[in-house]
Amino acid sequence: MSRRRNLGLVLGLSLLGVVVVIAVLAPILFKTGADELGQRFAPPSADHWLGTDAAGHDVLLRSLVATRLTLLMTVAATAIAVALGVLLGTSVWLMPRRLRELCLRAIDAMVAFPGLLLALVVAAVLGAGGSSAVIAIGVAGIPYFARLTGNLAAKVSQREFVSTARLLGVSPVRIAFRHLLPNMSEPLLVLSASTFAGTLTAISALSFVGLGVQSPSYDWGKLLNEALPSLLADRPFQLVGPAVLIVVTGLAAVLIGDGLAAAANPRAARTAAGGASTRRTSQGTPRDGYLVDVQELSIEYDGKQLVKGISFGIRQGEILGIVGESGSGKTLTAMALAQLLPDGLISNATRMTLGDLDLLGPVPPGLMAQTVGLVYQDPGSTFNPALRMGTQLTEVLRTHRRLGAQAARRRIIDALGTVRLSKPEQRMKQHPHELSGGMRQRAMIAAALATEPRLIIADEPTTALDVTVQAEILRELKRLNSEFGTSIMVISHDIGVVRALCHRVIVMYQGKAVEEIEAAHLTVASAQHSYTKALLEATPELTLENSHG
Amino acid sequence: MAHAAVAEHRSTSPWLHFAVRRLIGLAAIFLVLLVVSFLIVQLIPGDPAAGLAGANADLADIERIRHQLGLDQPLWQRFIDYAGGVLSGDLGTSFMYRQPVLTIIENRLPFTATIALAGIAIVLLVAIPLGMLIGVLTQGGRRKWLDTGFGFVTGFLDSVPGYVMATFLVVMFALGIGVLPLFPPAYTPRFGSASFVLPIAAIVIGPICTVSRVVRRETAVVLGNDYQRTAHGWRLPAWKRYIKWALPNLLTSTLTVSGLVLTGLIGGAVVIESVFALPGLGSGIIKAILDRDYPVIQAMVIVIGMIAALINLLVDILLGLIDERTLGGSHVSA
């Protein structure tokens, strides 16, 4: 992956190198040749590889000679945009807050306008010509660069060393030069490369429409402009020289920009192996009395074993807790049971059944949805922010129970009532962000209940919630369990939560179940494994019975 | 339920706030454009009247133009006259054509509007499905070759400027090897709508590549979100997870990022009109700058600027329709 990106950078730099060499040498070597007049509109030949133009100039030589002027103009305009943009963007950040807000709004408004319009305004004032084109395109690029610099400066200035410098009374200008700019140089370099590409296109565009370089000078845009009548007169080869050079130079700048960005931001390539988990059928002998029966479940990723042969069962109507630190494999275990392992993870087990369903083999999605209900950790992100609660919650029933919109709505409103969510009708019309975390988690539990599953898997259901809300949600799960007899599997890193909620607890450590114990016996004295003891010693008491309500 | 209060704080419709705020915004933009277009003439180096009259003009000519432009009056008086004229629909008379600027604008506006609006529609209609398809097909690091190929092709096409693409298309299709129908490479009223095919194609290819790359990246981000896992956990079928769950979220981030690309399309339209000799605002303003036809330039700066502002507004309205939460801000400052 990184080799490919570096290849892009190398390719970009070498392309640009070739163009720069042409820019340096071509005017020296070919200037006289390019000015020589020959036969007009000659087709490509050994003498004139790309033919001649309306005046009889060699098109190829003129394209090569034009490289220098084009590059110089592009560099100049880029320099204007970058230098003034950085200056503006940085100084905006050093202004007092009110003024800064105002300036940022103004810059935003300017960015929203096509730069070309600003360039045309400048060109209208200064008149057509090469230098006015440079100024026009350079000025037009300032707002964009100022905004990007402003955004970068905003990020950097929130870092500690900048606030420290500010507290120490270092002058704003000094902060800008000593702290802000050096820390923004890498992204600014990347942006400069892409600005260069845009500037090249824009300057050539101005020359192309006749507002840029004027005769007798010529850049690539001007050559394209001269070639246009030939194109319409069926002599396309006159265009080839300037068109190819513009594209190649632009491509070089883009490749360099991408390559620099990749080098500055080396993200480890994710080599997720494709392919689903290996599916087989359960073979191990069933254990009596268990709704869920998992034997020798192991999960591996990229050859590394994350879960190392765990066996457990969940009885009908039982709440089983799985507790352990992050990375202990508890969530993976639950996700394997729910057939929701992420791509690239491979699970193996001798037996994994839920009632009469064999979870090692394929299970129809509808059946699966009505067998296992899921409650996730962060209710802030489990709901789709773009859809109303009602739309999302009814989807399961409409998809898998084939209920109509109205019937599904009624069922969900009932379920919301069951989990004691206030004003269920109104909630259905709201978006997730209009509900609190606790309300969303109740809604999630309601969605899980709505299909009347045999097992609810709750993965850290209270971790993201306030302590008081935590207790409410735990109470809710416990009540549903005793009222409906639904089996629940609770994953948590919090032994207090597990002890308060569960009947039985499995402690996982580094991919293994190190202890299985009745929740009532979960005390330092009765725990066998040292890790369990350590967990218990670090946990304050929390019991639902004692909390209010 | 201590948290019930959270939901009730939005009393007035967010759309009303949005409408009021954006109308004020449009008015402000109009005012800025008015000032900028006014300043164009004032900032011309040297004596604008002498410059406008040309090298062969005598003193009387210069005086006449000076008076015609109101240059013999104080600056604020000139601005008030100018603003009053614009607001009452009097955009002045073209130096070149001796006809009201308003007529010129009315004749040329449809061409530019057609190209720009059709271009935007095509960019969105092609780029979003394309980028999403690639994003879905390559999720989780699958189909590396497709990802690489897509990145390379779009990256290359993206670095071809619209006007070069235009010439290339003309060579391929219009002059054609006889394989494809001959589109007119330059505008002729006889061909009507067929005249727009190549110009639009030329300006949309680059933006399609840019936007579809954004969509492809955003697809990867959206598909990695928790709510997609929720949909998976509810065992919703694939099309529902992609179309109903992912697409709305994708659209908000995509439109937010590519709003600028769409406004940039106006700039592309301005240049492309020159390639195909389309009698639109773009070729009009360029010709006016070359002719130093200032009343036309001023009016066209205002009109093109307002078109850009309206496109920005359109993007924000689209965003608001998809997700009301976005009404609070603008895609530009997001």
Image (cartoon, rainbow, N blue to C red):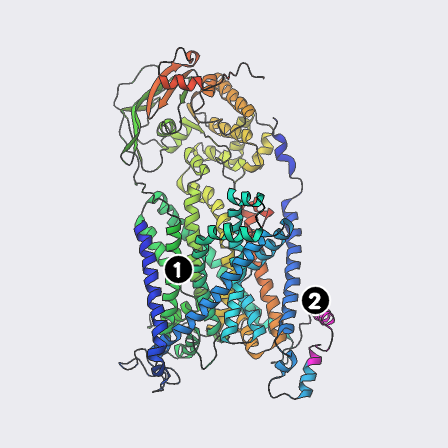
Residue for point 58% across, 17% down: A548
When asked about the image quadrant of residue A509, the answer is: top left
Magenta region, residue range = B66-92
Q: Is residue B233 magenta?
A: no
When asked about the image quadrant of residue A359, the answer is: top left
Residue for point 44% across, 39% down: B225
Q: Is residue B67 magenta?
A: yes
Q: Are marks 2 and 1 in contact (CB under 8 Å)?
A: no
Q: Which residue ends up furthest to the left in the rendered image?
A: A283
Residue A201 x/y as whole percent: 44, 67
Residue A156 x/y as whole percent: 51, 47
Q: Residues within 10 Å of mark 1 (few under 14, many from 20)?
A: many
Q: Is residue A237 above or below residue B259?
A: below
Q: Is A363 on the left or on the right of A403, as rendered?
A: left
Looking at the picture, tell me which residue is in the foreground, A428 or B17. Answer: B17
**In the rendered image, which residue does mark 1 sit on?**
A254
Q: Secondary structure at mark 2?
A: helix
**In the rendered image, which residue does mark 2 sit on?**
B87
Q: Secondary structure at mark 1?
A: helix
Inspect the image, locate mark 2, and give the three-letter code of the amino acid beneath it: Leu
Tag 1 subunit: A
Quadrant into which the C terminus of chain A falls: top right
Residue B13 circle label = none
